[in-house]
Image (tube, rainbow, N blue to C red):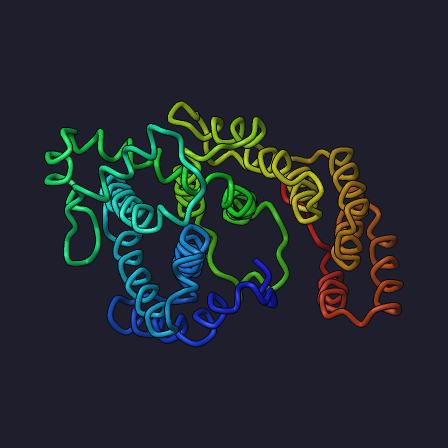
Amino acid sequence: MQPQDPQLACLEHFFRVAMPAAVRKLGAWQGLSRVYHGDLVDDLSQEVAADFVAHRQSIEAMSIDQRHERWLRLVGRSHYWLRGRTASARQSDAVLDDIAAAVSTVTQGPALGSGDAKFAETLMQHGVHLKNGRLNELITARSIGLTPLQLRRRGERLVAALQGGRDVEFWRRRLTEALLGLAADVLRDGRHVLILEEHGRNRPDPHARLQRVLRIRERLRYLPVDATLRRVLLRYGSKCRNPHDPERALGSALDLSPNAPHVHLWCFELAIARRHPQRAARALRQARDCAADPTAVVLARARLLEFRGHDHAARALLRRAQRRSDDRRLRVSLDRMTQPIKASG
């Protein structure tokens, strides 16, 4: 999401004004650290963004205090889910929250089919709510003659019908980012890639990255997705044998975003790690065709030259690039060239 987008002003205001204080409080009370739990902080922000996308119309109608109070509660609740609750409990509570929010805004949503419309009307008439606004699952299910599981399933379909395809593209981008992060962390964790100033970055955590992919997959479960996105989601189903495979993750990211230059640059890194210079060169050409960052392209070209044993040519390339652009990454790479960059296999 673009921070400068005026249509997202209320969301960006929360991230700028209230989110840092919430993270500091969680750090003091629960030991949350941006250094060691960067992915978790990102997930908390994504939960807020997802809530905004799903319930935008009603949220924009709230006052600033009401919005911030809602999102601060969501941040606290999500932190508890993500750090300590089981996946099944998280999903169950999230579904009930989504159903309650959807029913409260059903008159503002798109036209519903007769079955969904009838179910929404039944929930509005007979739904029993707790003090926090969530549906009382057991009593509501009994009052309308369903089991709790049937209530959740029909509620999920209702939420999907109300949301339609509005947030599919949002979650498509988030899934691409999560897949890219998964591949990057697997490669970093195995020391297969060279990252400038690695010591200043968050430690790689492939397991957390995979969990994020699976959470997004669950979000998309009942939304109307296209064939490409459906194929990607199926690759991470219960029968997936090696969900941490970086080639699977990058191939999926490439399917979702074939024109994203950073995806091609990570495909280049994977090819170098697996000692496939021809694949690396092809990925690099595709990154350039997609208007990748020129400095990143130069660094990749230098790495490919060195991988092929052309150390002097790699140094010369970096020196020429530095004369054209005083980019710190070029200076750091040239300093490292006194001890040549090694492509790990």
Find the residue positioned furthest to the top.
Answer: 239
Image position, residue 170 (x, y; %): 53, 47
Does 73 sit left or right of 198 as displayed? Answer: left
Image position, residue 74 (x, y; %): 31, 60
Quadrant the N terminus occupies:
bottom right
Give the residue displayed 28% in from the left and 54% down from the top. 83
Note whether 69 is above or below 269 in the view shown.
below
Can you see residue 85? yes
Does 231 sit left or right of 149 as displayed? Answer: right
Can you see residue 182? no
Image position, residue 215 (x, y; %): 39, 42
Q: How many marks?
A: 0
In the foreground, 50 or 106: 106
Residue 298 position by quadrant: bottom right
Give the residue displayed 31% in from the left and 64% down from the top. 70
In the foreground, 337 or 279: 279
Quadrant the C terminus occupies:
top right
Give the residue displayed 15% in from the left and 33% down from the top. 144
Does 204 sit left or right of 316 as displayed? Answer: left
Image position, residue 324 (x, y; %): 88, 68
Residue 80 position by quadrant: bottom left
Give the residue displayed 52% in from the left and 69% down from the top. 9
